[in-house]
């Protein structure tokens, strides 16, 4: 029973970690996709029980680029410029997620810094900052500590 419980806990931790990374990645894609001006975008994140989105190790998202039920968006999809701009936004978001934005993806804590202030300076919320840096519910940070603050 102990092995079964341990395996269940490890499975849950792995799934939660991957889900959190998927959220981070999805927010980066949404941010990059906002530059594709031709379509109005719903930036709300949703989840779905698709098997392809449930990998234990690989962050994954499903991106709806446009809707063929919308005549304007259907015409955009037919154009190579629109498809190229969507592909470029997605490529940029992937690279930022995988490599980090140069000079913007990490911050070294200075004396007197607070988690709230660091989050505010980098345009993210403290919950996301805690998630990215595996801080749990703690607001405790230390001078010299390197924090992930970007995609």
Image (spheres, rainbow, N blue to C red):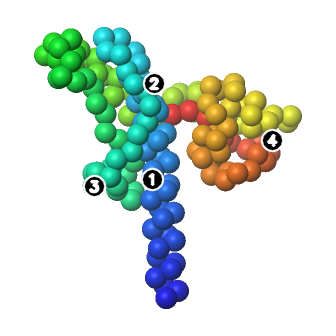
Q: Nearer the viewer, residue 137 or 85?
A: 137
Q: Which of marks 4 and 1 is nearer the N terminus?
A: 1
User: From what the image shows, is residue 113 above or below residue 136?
Assistant: above
User: From what the image shows, is residue 76 above or below residue 28?
Assistant: above
Q: Earlier in the sequence, mark 4 or mark 2?
A: 2
Q: How crowded is mark 3: few (under 14 residues within 10 Å), some or many (20 or more)?
A: few
> Residue at point 17% right, 23% down?
68
Disc 2 is placed on an element classified as helix
Q: Residues within 10 Å of mark 4 (few under 14, many from 20)?
A: few
Q: How crowded is mark 2: few (under 14 residues within 10 Å), some or many (20 or more)?
A: some
User: Can residue 134 be spotted in the picture?
Assistant: yes
Query: Does residue 72 appear left or right of residue 115 in this picture?
Result: left
Q: Position of residue 138 (x, y in %)?
A: 74, 50
Mark 2 and mark 4 in contact (Cβ < 8 Å)? Answer: no
Q: Which mark is residue 51?
A: 3
Observer-side mark, 4 or 3, equals: 3
Q: Position of residue 101 (x, y in %)?
A: 51, 29
Residue farthest front in this picture: 69
Q: Which residue in the structure is indicated by mark 4?
A: 143
Mark 3 and mark 4 in contact (Cβ < 8 Å)? Answer: no
> Residue at point 60% right, 47% down?
131
């Amino acid at each position: 029973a102990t092995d079964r419980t341990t395996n269940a806990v490890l499975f849950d931790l792995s799934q939660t970690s991957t889900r959190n990374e998927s959220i981070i990645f999805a927010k980066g894609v949404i941010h990059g996709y906002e530059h594709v001006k031709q379509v109005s975008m719903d930036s709300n994140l949703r989840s779905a029980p698709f098997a392809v989105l449930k990998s234990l190790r690989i962050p994954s998202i499903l991106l709806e680029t446009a809707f063929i039920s919308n005549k304007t968006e259907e015409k955009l999809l037919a154009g190579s410029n629109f498809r190229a701009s969507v592909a470029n936004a997605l490529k940029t978001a992937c690279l930022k997620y995988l490599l980090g934005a140069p000079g913007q993806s990490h911050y070294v804590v200075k004396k007197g810094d607070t988690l709230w202030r660091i989050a505010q300076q980098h345009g993210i919320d403290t919950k996301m900052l805690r998630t990215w840096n595996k801080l749990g519910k703690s607001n405790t940070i230390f001078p010299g500590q390197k924090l992930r603050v970007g995609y």
